[in-house]
Structure formats: C-alpha cells, structure tokens
Amino acid sequence: MTNLTVTTYKECIDACIRCMNVCNTSYVSSLKGLDIFELRECLRLDRECADLCGMAVQAMTRNSPFVAEICELVAKACDACADECMKHPHEHCQECVKVCRECASVCRSMLVAA
C-alpha cells in the first residue's frame, strides 16, 4: 500500500464510520417517531447503508482485494439513502443526507486509488 493509498484508506474509513453512525442514529430516531409508516423506506436504507459502511471499514482495514467494488456499492447505497432521506424534513434525516453524500464522494475517490 502506498502512502497515498494509506491516506485515502484512512479518509474513506473515517467517512464510512461517520456515515454508519449517522445512519444508525437516523434509524433509531425514525423508530421513535409517530410517522414510522412514512419513514419505512428511510428506515430500510438507513440499515442497508450502515451495514455496508461497516463492511467497507472491515474490508479496508484488512486490505481486501475487493475494496474498489465494495466502495462502489457503498457509494450507491449512500446515494440511495440520501435521496430517500431528502424527502423527510426531520433533522436526523437531513444530517443523514449530508453525511451520506460526503461518504459517497470519498468512496468514489477509492475507485480511482484502488
């Protein structure tokens, strides 16, 4: 692993951890609301995104040969989660949009570096 790759991995790992945490927070916050039926797709995508971000962190920490493919999938999941959360005015949803977009961008940078 080159220094550029180590730096890129660290940045991506940090972005994925932030995203995983924000998606988990959004998930739990959505469960506490009265409009859970309206948030069902948001709930589903929060879980998917958080789980995939966790998987990406594990893959990067062990220098998996599949990092590029996993990061591409994470970027797609982050975009889908952000698109869905954008539909809801809740503060936790809007924070999720911001962090998911950032994570997707960093994960896409891995496609070039990997």
Image (spheres, grey):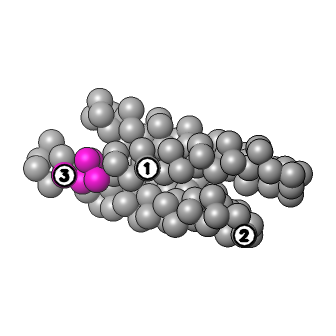
Question: Which element carries disc 1, helix, strand or loop?
Answer: helix
Answer whether residue 10 is magenta in the image: yes
Above or below: residue 47 compared with residue 58: below
Mark positioned earlier in the residue sequence (2 or 3): 3
The percent coordinates of residue 30 (x first, y second) are 74, 49
| Left or right position of 26 against 76 | right
Question: Which element carries disc 2, helix, strand or loop?
Answer: loop
Which one is closest to the eye, mark 3 or mark 1? Answer: 1
Answer whether residue 50 is magenta in the image: no
Can residue 22 be spotted in the picture?
yes
Question: Which element carries disc 3, helix, strand or loop?
Answer: helix
Can residue 74 be spotted in the picture?
no
The residue beneath circle 2 is 89
Amino acid type of the residue tagged 2 in the rendering = Pro
Label ID, residue 7? 3
The percent coordinates of residue 70 (x first, y second) are 45, 44
- Magenta range is 7-11
**Mark 3 Cα within 10 Å, few/some/many (few <14, many 20+)?**
few
Above or below: residue 4 compared with residue 66: below
Amino acid type of the residue tagged 3 in the rendering = Thr
In percent of the image, x 39 and y 32: which residue is there? 58
* Front in this rendered view, residue 22 or 44: 22
Above or below: residue 17 compared with residue 112: above
Which one is closest to the eye, mark 2 or mark 3? Answer: 2
**Mark 2 Cα within 10 Å, few/some/many (few <14, many 20+)?**
few
The residue beneath circle 1 is 18
The kind of secondary structure the magenta stretch mainly shows is helix
